[in-house]
Amino acid sequence: MGMSAAFVLSALVQFLLGLVVAWLLGPAEFGAYALAVAAGILLQTLCFEWLRLGATRFFHAAATRLRRRLVSAFLASALLAGLLAVLAWPLLPAPLPGGRLLLLALVPGLALAAGFLDLVAAMLRARFREADYARVLLVRNALGITLVPLAAGLTGKAEAAALALFASLVAAALAAWRLETAGPDPVPEGGEAEMPSLGALAGYSGPVVATNLLYLALFFALRSWAALTGGLALAGQVSLALDFVLKLFTTFGSALDLWLFQRAVQAARDEGPEAGQAQLHRNQELVLSILLAMALGLLLVIEALDVLLVRPDFRGLFAHAVMLLTPGIFLYALIQYAVHPYAQLAQRTRSLPITALAVLACAGAGGAVLVWLPPGLAGIGLVLAAAMAAGLLLLAARSPGYQAPSPRFLGKLTVAILAMVLPVALVRQWDSGLLAALAAIALGAAGFALAAWLLDLAGLRQIRLPRRAVS
């Protein structure tokens, strides 16, 4: 639980950092910053994510010689990342027009620094070095929350903020490497375990990497569309709304997944595959309940929270974009945290990139239709939601052992949602100010939680912490 808590806290810090940087930079400069960071994440995922996943799965106390192989593979991947950055250089200025050469040059730097940091952090997690893993996240977040806003506030430039982010990642990566390699490696009683080949690492990680890459490409295309059609200011507006909703749902979704999927693995290991499938079904119901309550609650209060969350030149369009993007990102979170685990537990992950490719194809088809219609965020939100809905249905149909939520559960969920929506609607009708919105959030959350507990929604009252960690 220690590493899960550290991960969630780090994600929340990164969530707040995005809002702070947007406030300090303004729409146009934040649009440039967000595009550079998103391009860096895309390049990182393409070149380095397979190593992080391989370290998570295969690096442990009996396989410490794998460290050298992973680092050697990282260096080779770094050369590939540099080559791809050079090849993509003529394309990047399209969403980042004229005079942003430093920002463009920082894209591969961000990918390299973040990729190495994530790889070393994965080694620490794989060896259950919770304290060291927490220290790494503390260094990363402390530097990021200090240096990036300072650079953004002093200069008002995307380049300075991105350079500060790069510096914080490099410093955190160096600190992580010192912690990971400090002291002699433990000598296992049975000797070193057999090391997997790089081909085995790539084969294990490939489907998951391809899946993540396709979804990231879709979200990057959305940011680029905004930059190309409305300039960097619109890109900043769209990026802030997209990052806000994505980080909100992925933070809570990841926290649930870190906890709940472990329970399914444990049930399958201790009681057999059928018990694992049954636990996955309960997990799905709980994830659906929480994410749906979050989505509806966000739609009800975002217009009032607009004043609290963003600076004046973001207001209005930010809330509008959040409302339009939330349905599609809610469905994306269901794909990731409610349905993906079925394929993961059965170790049949090849269906995941097929689903992501179908989502991308649907979004591309929808985007082609939008070319002939008046530009606007409403069409983009509709295309995103429709593409994610198609992907969700396709993956559910292809996932082994998948069961749709039962009518009885859906009835309970409806009652719990009403217990949340009614007090929120009453408070919002009485007063539309910021304090009323905060009160509505508290009352809505309390109403949902109470109803969920009384109804034993998704077996909530039977949930217990796992008896031991799954290695």
Image (spheres, rainbow, N blue to C red):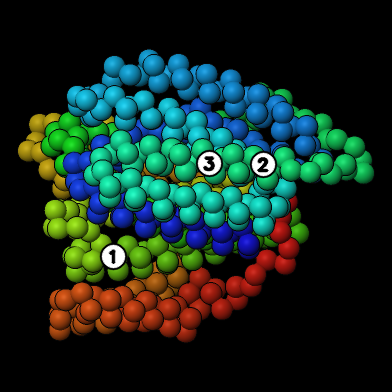
Q: Residue at x 19, y 46 (%)?
A: 27
Q: In the rendered image of this protein, does residue 265 appear above or below residue 293? A: above
Q: Which residue is mark 2?
A: 178
Query: Amino acid under label 2?
Result: Arg
Mark 3 vs mark 1: in front: 3
Residue 123 in percent (x, y) is at 67, 42
Q: Which residue is mark 1?
A: 298
Whole-angstrom CA distance, mark 3 to mark 2, is 11 Å
Upstream in sequence: badge 3 or badge 1: 3
Q: Residue at x 40, y 33 (%)?
A: 40
Mark 2 vs mark 1: in front: 2
Q: In the rendered image of this protein, does residue 136 appear above or below residue 48? A: below
Question: Front-most of 294 and 432?
Answer: 432
> Which residue extends farthest left?
374
- 376 to the left or right of 423: left
Secondary element under disc 1, as helix, strand or loop, is helix
- 436 to the left or right of 161: left
Residue 255 in percent (x, y) is at 52, 59
Secondary element under disc 3, as helix, strand or loop, is helix
Residue 418 visible somewhere in the drawing: no
> Circle 3: is it few (<14), some (14-19), or many (20+) Cα within 10 Å?
some
Whole-angstrom CA distance, mark 3 to mark 1, is 36 Å
Question: Front-most of 340 and 313?
Answer: 313
Question: Front-most of 233 and 279?
Answer: 233
Which circle marks residue 171 in the picture? 3
Give the position of the N terminus as an image quadrant.
bottom right
Q: In the rendered image of this protein, does residue 98 appear above or below residue 39? A: above
